[in-house]
Amino acid sequence: MNGLRKFLHDLPWPLLIVGAVLLGLAPFVPEPHLVEKLRMLGNGTLHKPIDIFDLFYHGLPIILIALKLTLRPVEKS
């Protein structure tokens, strides 16, 4: 677990935020892939491997941000 914490700690915030915005909203027209894939997941129609990969790929920066916030190093006082 320490390796994961170090990896997340070393990831710069601007890179994660820009990645989350760009990948989360790409393509901008007609509908972002992440929105489309989450809708498919909610409807139970997310079956094709390419759709599952798209959901993971476009959601990865958001997942990394959540992990970085959750697995912050514990400060010792």
Image: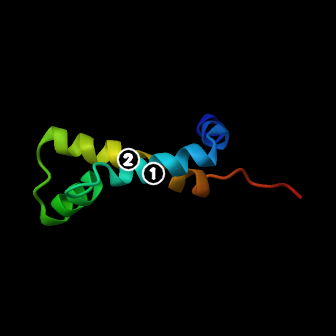
Residue 70 screen position, x and y as percent: 58, 57
- Colouring rule applied to residues: rainbow
Q: Quadrant of the N terminus?
A: top right
Q: Amino acid at mark 1?
A: Ala
Using residue 76 as the reference point, say whether residue 3 is left or right of it: left
Q: Amino acid at mark 2?
A: Leu
Residue 63 versus residue 4 in the image, above or below: below
Q: Which residue is mark 1?
A: 20
Residue 41, by quadrant, is bottom left
Using residue 29 as the reference point, say whether residue 44 is left or right of it: left
Q: Report if the CB atoms under discs 1 and 2 are less than 8 Å apart.
A: yes
Residue 21 screen position, x and y as percent: 44, 53
Residue with the most extreme front position: 29
Residue with the most extreme right position: 77
**Does dot 1 land on a helix, a strand or a loop?**
helix
Q: Which residue is mark 2?
A: 23
**CA–CA distance in space, label 1 to label 2:** 5 Å
Q: Residues within 10 Å of mark 2 (few under 14, many from 20)?
A: many
Residue 29, by quadrant, is bottom left
